[in-house]
Each structure stands twice: as structure tokens, then as C-alpha cells.
Image (tube, rainbow, N blue to C red):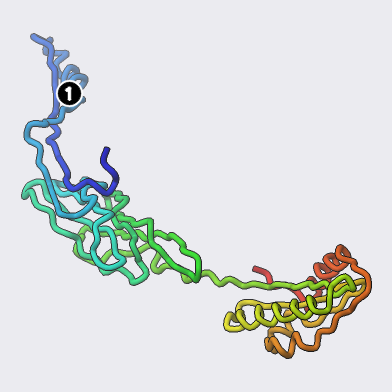
Amino acid sequence: MLGWGEFQQVDLWHRKASCFIPAWPSPLLLPLALVLLCDGFNLETEKAAIFQENARSFGHSVVQLEGSGFVVGAPQEIKAANQTGGLYQCDYSTGKCEPIHLQLPLEAVNMSLGLSLAFATKPFRLLACGPTVHQTCKENTYVNGLCFLFGPNLRQQPQSFPEKIRECPRQDSDIAFLIDGSGSINPIDFQRMKDVRRVTFSNVMPDASSQFSLMQFSEEFQTHFTFNKFKENPNPQLLVNPIRQLYGRTHTATGILKVVTVSQHCHHRWRKV
């Protein structure tokens, strides 16, 4: 079995009309016999035209144009670094194929151009797509697609859809920290919690899309800083150093409910994403 990247040729056959007319038909029935019995066709396999190109997956997709022309896709052809896929304009009468040169946008990384082709007439339209555009956004990789719409002249730069790949999505993060400051927490461990928070805030300071708030619970509840306060002055030392352990009994469920309620207040509110 061949994989989708292993085709390298296209075989074309003539389509021949096939008619069967009964012997000695009545002159009155001859037109009807031609209509009914000349509705099929055969493929002439003995004189196939073979088109070959040194392009990986050449022949994966083929569309017949008007006349003797057709377009072939080679979605796994390596055109340049981070650029895969090619299109070829072929002509049955000459037996030759010529590459269709495109000016691809820089963000069209490994798009597999020619993986899908479609053709329509009146007006002439050829659509060639590459659905595997790779876009790296921080630690995530997204897969997008690009299509090109050609007019009658395949040598002219086509329209692209979309016109440009969307930018990396902005990942806004609003994180509310709730720390246990009750008497069940050893003061040394409480200090370690503060150290961890300082490191966390320091690591995310270059990322302006992240905001933090911090609250402490025991049998009491205390808000140390809100999202707005963090946004105004995201200094880890100034925010964390003044925090003192509350001690007292441990009311965990009440603390969780309180932080959810307080975060909906206008001065603390999470942003809508």
C-alpha cells in the first residue's frame, strides 16, 4: 500500500464514447436508439499519458481544467525550509508539467499546499488549500489552514483565505491565591509559602497578561492584595513581605467560599475572557 506522500506520477486515459445500435433499426426508432444507447463511455487504457515529476506526493490531488489542461498537487514536496507543498500546471497535448510559483506568507509554515484542490467554471476558479500550517505560541502549537483562489491566469498571484494567519491568542490569566494561615501551619512552613509566592510572582512579571491576588484564611479572612493592586505595583517583595500569619482555627471551606465571593467584587473582579 502506498502512503499519501509516495505518489510521483499521474496516469491519464482517453474517455471514448460507447454506442450500441441494434441491427436494422426502424428509421422511426433510430433517433431514440441513439439517445438511449449512446449514454456511456469507456476508458482507453492502452494509450495512457503518464506525467512524472521529482516531487514527493506528486499526484495526490488532480483537477481537470477546461480543454486539455489540469493541475496536480504535491503536498509533501519540500520547497524550502519550513515550506511544504507544490502545485503543477500540466497539459495533455504537450505531455509536460510546469510548477506554479506562489509568494507564500512567512507564517505559512509546512502547510502541505495542494493537499486539496477544487475547480469550478463560469467563472473560472481554482481553489488550492494547505490545511497544516504550524503556528507556535509559547509552549503550544496550533494547526491552521490557508487556501488560494486562482483566476484564469494561474501565473498571477491568487487571493489567499484568510488574508493572514491570526496572531497567537492572548492568554489572560487571573489567579487568586488562598493560603492557610491557621495555627495548624508551622511558622517555618508559612514562611516557605511566602517564599514560593515571591518566586511565582517574579517569574510571571514579564507577562503583562497575568494578574494575581492573595488572601489568607484561618477562622478569620484577610485580603492582602487584589488584582488591581497587583496590576498597579507587581513588586513581589512589597506585596508578600508584609504578610503575617493569622493563626487560630482552620476554616477551609469558609475560606474557599469567601475567596470566590470576594473575587466577584468590583475591586477584585476577574477579567472576562
Q: Quadrant of residue 272?
A: bottom right
Which residue is more in the foreground, 121 or 196? 196
Q: Position of residue 237 (x, y in %)?
A: 71, 89
Element type where label 1 sits in the image = loop
Which residue sits at x=15%, y=54%? 54
Q: Quadrant of residue 19?
A: top left
Which residue sits at x=31%, y=51%? 115
Which residue is more in the foreground, 141 or 267? 141
In-image side of 234 versus 97 (left or right)? right
Q: Position of residue 232 (x, y in %)?
A: 70, 88
- Residue tagged 1: 38
Which residue sits at x=88%, y=70%? 184
Q: Position of residue 215 (x, y in %)?
A: 81, 76
Quick one: label 1, few (<14), some, or many (20+) residues within 10 Å? few
Above or below, 149 against 240 in this view is above
The answer to whether residue 232 is visible is no
The quarter of the image holding the C terminus is bottom right
Amino acid under label 1? Cys
In-image side of 59 versus 255 (left or right)? left
Which residue sits at x=7%, y=47%? 93
Q: Position of residue 144 (x, y in %)?
A: 42, 60
The answer to whether residue 202 is visible is yes
In-image side of 257 versus 74 (left or right)? right
The quarter of the image holding the N terminus is top left
